[in-house]
Image (cartoon, rainbow, N blue to C red):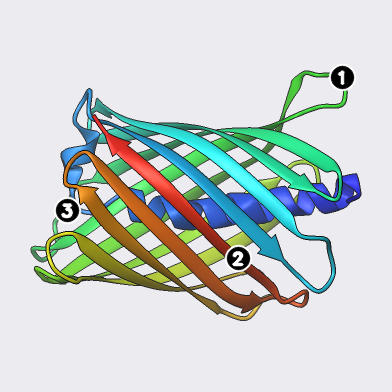
């Protein structure tokens, strides 16, 4: 895979990872922003398309509340494809905004910066993003979320925007089903589905995710993640 293709894949990764954050960051629930509340996430994902060789990604992320209605995340990601590999480092944040609307409605500001390991071994800033999330609890077992982000890719010297709409339904005390529709600049919306099982409530959870073919290259994704709260 060429460096340009890896850079494009990294941009897509930042967009896809922001979608994954929506599952961890509960808009309107500020419990995760309490100082000392942390979550460790391990995930793997495989992507296939008609234009490029299969790409495999593994990631490790640590999310911690720091108080002031804010949560910070540090993630390390590695992508492998056709004998090439690339590592990226991300620092992201989420700040819950004051809510003056109806009960059950929440707003949050999300932001972050990404870096990639250069050819000489150093880290270089590759992109940044800022966005707004909104979530509404329609019932104890049902919530909807909307997110809009603006992403800057420094390596490609271009901007991209993305929106994501999600519906989450609780299927009992331990299982959550989440459906999402999202798109970035110039692409048609594509659906994705994830299932989260709280195997050990308030301790560990397993997530499986899948997305339908999207974009001109018909890229499709499938992956799994394991999270630990402490």
Residue at label 3?
Answer: 99
Q: Secondary structure at mark 2?
A: strand
Q: Quadrant of the C terminus?
A: top left
Residue 102, image x, y percentages = 10, 66
In the rendering, which numbered label is found on residue 120?
A: 1
Residue under the point 79% across and 39% down: 85
On the question of residue 179 being in view, the answer is yes
Question: Of marks 3 and 2, which one's residue comes earlier in the chain?
Answer: 3
Q: Which of 167 and 174 lies nearest the eye of the viewer?
A: 174
Residue at label 2?
Answer: 221
Closer to us: mark 2 or mark 1?
2
In the rendering, which numbered label is found on residue 194?
A: none
Residue under the point 54% across and 71% down: 211
Residue 141, image x, y percentages = 13, 70
Mark 2: few/some/many CA within 10 Å (<14, 14-19, 20+): some
Q: Which of 129 and 121 lies nearest the eye of the viewer?
A: 121
Q: Secondary structure at mark 1?
A: loop
């Amino acid at each position: 895979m060429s460096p340009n293709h890896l850079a494009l894949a990294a941009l897509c990764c930042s967009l896809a990872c922001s979608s994954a954050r929506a599952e961890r960051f509960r808009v309107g629930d500020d419990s995760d922003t309490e100082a000392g509340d942390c979550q460790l996430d391990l995930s793997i994902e495989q992507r296939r398309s008609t234009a490029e060789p299969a790409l495999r990604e593994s990631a490790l992320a640590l999310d911690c509340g720091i108080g002031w209605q804010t949560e910070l995340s540090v993630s390390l990601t590695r992508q492998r494809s056709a004998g090439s590999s690339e590592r990226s480092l991300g620092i992201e944040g989420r700040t819950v905004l004051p809510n003056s609307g109806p009960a059950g409605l929440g707003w949050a500001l999300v932001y972050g910066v990404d870096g990639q390991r250069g050819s000489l071994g150093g880290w270089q800033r590759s992109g940044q993003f800022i966005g707004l999330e909104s979530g509404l609890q329609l019932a104890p077992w049902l919530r909807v979320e909307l997110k809009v982000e603006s992403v800057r890719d420094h390596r490609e010297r271009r901007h991209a925007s993305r929106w994501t709409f999600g519906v989450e339904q609780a299927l009992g005390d331990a299982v959550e089903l989440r459906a999402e529709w999202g798109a970035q600049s110039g692409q048609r919306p594509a659906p994705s589905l994830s299932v989260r099982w709280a195997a050990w409530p308030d301790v560990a959870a397993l997530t499986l995710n899948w997305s339908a073919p999207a974009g001109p290259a018909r890229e499709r994704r499938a992956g799994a993640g394991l999270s630990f709260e402490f």
